[in-house]
Amino acid sequence: MDRETYIVNRFSDIQVLANEAKVMIEDLSTEYFGKRIDSEERQWEIMPPYYDHAGIKACIINDIVCKFIKELTGLGSVLDSNNVEERELEINDLMEKYNCNRDIAEILLNN
């Protein structure tokens, strides 16, 4: 798989993970933390096992976020390696253009 396809695929995966996390967070907020208990008959809504489900959903969200971070880290390393390759090409071009050594080319590139 070439670098561009890899980046596009990872970016799509990251978008899906972000949307999954958003849906789970909205669900958790609405179903569990958006409750207003007006009477004793509705006390069950803030007691186990009702809130056990909230814990399960929180674990799912945590897993999604961990996958999200892993994907971002992987994508970042690919982008970083791409930047290193581009920089090497620029340094080589400057060395050839000005007939200078690597140190001079790096100075020229940084300024």
Image (tube, grey):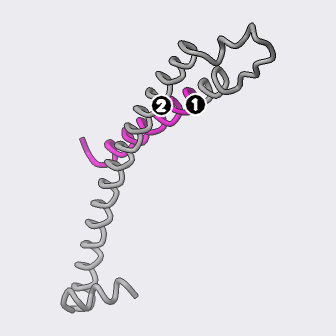
Q: Give above or below for 14 relative to 58.
A: below
Q: Main secondary structure of the magenta part?
A: helix
Q: Residue at horizontal 67%, vertical 24%?
A: 30
* Residue indicated by mark 1: 25
Q: Which mark is residue 57?
A: none
In the rendered image, which quarter is residue 98 located in?
bottom left
From the top left corner, tell me how far across and down residue 35 is, in percent. 72, 22
Q: Residue at horizontal 81%, vertical 17%?
A: 38
Is disc 1 placed on a helix, strand or loop?
helix
From the top left corner, tell me how far across and down residue 8 is, in percent. 39, 42
Front-most of residues 93 and 69: 69
* Residue indicated by mark 2: 61
Is disc 2 placed on a helix, strand or loop?
helix
| Residue 50 lies in the magenta-colored region | no
Q: Residues within 10 Å of mark 2 (few under 14, many from 20)?
A: many
Which quadrant: the C terminus?
A: bottom left
The residue segment tinted magenta is 1-25
Which tag, 1 or 2, sits closer to the chain's start?
Answer: 1
Residue type of the residue flagged with mark 1: Ile
Is residue 89 shown left or right of residue 56? left
Which quadrant: the N terminus?
A: top left
Is residue 33 shown left or right of residue 2? right
Q: Residue at horizontal 39%, vertical 47%?
A: 72
Residue type of the residue flagged with mark 2: Ile
Front-most of residues 85 and 39: 39
- Labels 1 and 2 touching (C-beta < 8 A): yes
| Residue 24 lies in the magenta-colored region | yes
